[in-house]
Amino acid sequence: MEKVTQLDTFRSVSKGVGRFNVQGKRLLIPQMNQFNSQLLAGVFKSFGVNAKAMETYEGLDLGKKYTSGKECFPCIVTLGDILLFMKKERERLGESFNPENYIYFMPDADGPCRFGMYNKFHRIILDSIPGLDKVKISELNSDDAYDLKGLIPKENLIAFRKAGYLSIVVGDILDRLVWRIRPYEKVEGMADTFINEAMERMAESFARHSSEKDLSPITDDLIEVVKEGKNIIDPHVPRKPLIGAVGEIYLRSHVKSNQDTIRTLEKYGAEVVNASIGEWINYTTYDQVRLARIAIGLNLKRFKLKEIKKYLLQYLKYNITLFYQYMQQRKVYQMVRKYIDIAEDHKIGHLEKVLKTKNTFSFEVGTEACLSISSALELSHRGYNGIVNIFPFTCLPSNLTASITKPLMGKLNVPYIDVDYDGSFQPGREAALRTFMYQANQHFKIHGRP
């Protein structure tokens, strides 16, 4: 057998991970949020890409087989998802199976979070399995706010980004809709049945209309879904303590990985609002504006005109993008809130001000810790009755969040709990969540809710 060197591995990563054109390929999208992946697949389909949101968590044993347990839990889950999918495709297609027909979609981010290494690690594992070295991994990166250049034709970039961002917003709203109605449903199970059907309808709507200039048919379909969802609420059920969920984006969004923490909290009397996916997308764009502004200031001091021009153009580009995202997000939320009082989203600039007020933390550090710490403070000041921090075991940014947020919540007398996950079932976890909800109920009795 030919010896594989470190240089071979580096070459494989550089050649097998990149912004590959997905036209004519089967694009495999790992699930994180239960809605966003399905809706994003619909957007790709509208632009002629054969996209599929893979089933998730069923391949966990495969993911564990190729990992040591020291990796981030989301890395293990998503690795298992792609390995199980390819295993089933081999079995389904037999000799006609061609790994070159597939592209695995795995975005990344800059450090210090290890998410930036997932697709590199997945590349190494795929290369170790005969035939799967031909499966390419297509990436997007947070350092350019997930620019889509290279994935789809240039002429479709703007239209795709608009529809793609709308799919993020709509996915967030579907989440917030089910969290709003499920604690108050007339008949147990109605909300789950309704929201699964609604997801399929909205995914089909995105597949039909995303490539059109006018995206209003999508929002029209969303409004119909919201109206139907509101009718599930029993108006005689009194409002419950309001809990804010923050933490690592994958674990707090991936229902199976966090063992359905939100449903457990609801079981003990909560109404929960989880942080959105749109918050992270807006943050990556906002961060590029912030970094460009800093670079302009530094180069003004050095009088480097060429660099000033370069960063000024970046500043304008990302500012325009952020303005559009906020405008689109606000527009859709306002339309929905005419019919039901779901929670609105934060503006990232405001969250940074929350941190700066008492020099609590800095956006210079980066990662989700910026958002989780500031969101916990903001929600507490708004009158939420408790904060839960959901994250993978050993997650660096989330442990940083926990170390800063817990004492802050103690000073504010707001109930707080950290819940970390690694795929194991801890017998005391539900008891801890139940105790937390007892504290949140006491807070609710004394202070009410926003």
Image: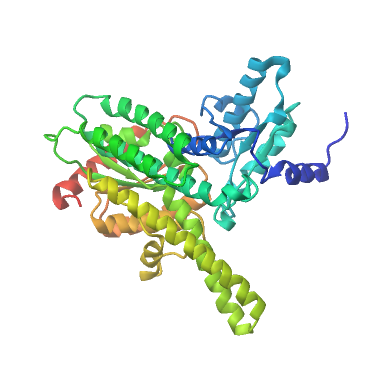
Q: Residue 430, percent across and down?
A: 34, 33
Asked where in the image residue 143 lies, by quadrant, the reply is bottom right
Q: Is residue 403 left or right of residue 152?
A: left
Using the rendered image of the protein, determine whether residue 207 is visible from the camera's viewpoint.
yes
Q: Is residue 68 left or right of residue 244?
A: right
Residue occupying image coordinates x 41% and y 32%? 259
**Colour option used:** rainbow
Residue occupying image coordinates x 55% and y 78%? 297
Residue extending furthest toward the left: 236
Using the rendered image of the protein, determine whether residue 345 is visible from the camera's viewpoint.
no
Q: Quadrant of the N terminus?
A: top right
Q: Classify 81 as above or below 173.
A: above
Residue extending furthest toward the front: 213
Q: Nearer the viewer, residue 284 or 407?
A: 284
Q: Classify 83 as above or below 178.
A: above
Total numbered badges shown on the rendered structure: 0
Q: Nearer the viewer, residue 412 or 243?
A: 243
Q: Nearer the viewer, residue 271 or 103?
A: 103
Q: Is residue 304 left or right of residue 163?
A: right
Q: Residue 294, percent across and down?
A: 54, 73
